[in-house]
Image (tube, rainbow, N blue to C red):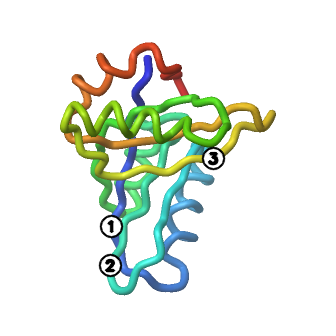
């Protein structure tokens, strides 16, 4: 399945906020598979893909850390100039907005893992079906 449940946690951008979130997940034995925390002033959002969303939800709730969920597309693209541009162009032509995205090269370096949230997930899935969407 080429989608994943992404947890989104809002909080004050201050020392210790991210440490608290990741410590709660570590104590619950939940592995973080992907992570995004853009630099912000004031209040920001941490986005996480985790090994066990249900266990993460429970652990965060017990720690009184509010998290919402969103569906994210997970793409494995060739790690070359223009690979992401090709995907972005398909979405642009279909008038699908990329709301959030981050990526990392795979361990081998030949692929890049791209995580996106978009304005129309179902339509994006159908358009990108042949573009190496992977379970993450």
Residue that badge 2 annotates: 43
x and y, in percent, of residue 90 in the image: 34, 31
In what quadrant of the picture does the C terminus appear? top right
Q: State the residue at coordinates (46%, 34%).
A: 86
Which quadrant of the structure image shows residue 19?
bottom right
Provide the residue designation for mark 1: 10
Q: Residues within 10 Å of mark 1 (few under 14, many from 20)?
A: some
Camera-near label (1 vs 3) is 3
Q: As drawn, is 107 to the left or to the right of 81?
A: right
**Residue under pointer 3:** 104
Which is nearer the N-term, disc 1 or disc 2? 1
Determine whether the residue tagged by mark 3 lies in a helix, strand or loop. strand
Report the front residue among 99 and 24.
Answer: 99
In the figure, 5 relative to 16: above or below?
above
Neighbourhood count class around disc 3 (C-alpha, 10 Å): few under 14, some 14–19, many 20 upward: some
Q: Residues within 10 Å of mark 2 (few under 14, many from 20)?
A: few
Determine contact: label 1, label 2, CB under 8 Å: yes
Residue lying at 62% horizontally and 42% vertically, measured from the top left: 81
Q: Nearer the viewer, mark 2 or mark 3?
A: 3
**Residue 8: x %, y % from top left:** 35, 54
State the SS at label 2.
strand
């Amino acid at each position: 399945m080429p989608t994943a449940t992404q947890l989104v946690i809002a909080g004050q951008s201050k020392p210790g906020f991210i440490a608290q979130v990741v410590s709660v997940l570590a104590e619950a034995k939940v592995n973080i598979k992907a992570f995004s925390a853009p630099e912000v002033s004031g209040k920001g959002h941490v986005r996480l893909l985790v090994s066990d969303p249900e266990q993460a939800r429970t652990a965060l709730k017990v720690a009184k850390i509010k998290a919402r969920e969103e569906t994210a597309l997970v793409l494995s693209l060739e790690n070359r100039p223009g690979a992401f541009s090709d995907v972005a162009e398909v979405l642009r032509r279909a008038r699908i907005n990329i709301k959030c995205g981050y990526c990392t090269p795979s361990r081998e370096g030949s692929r890049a893992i791209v995580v996106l949230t978009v304005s129309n997930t179902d339509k994006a899935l159908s358009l990108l079906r042949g573009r190496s969407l992977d379970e993450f």
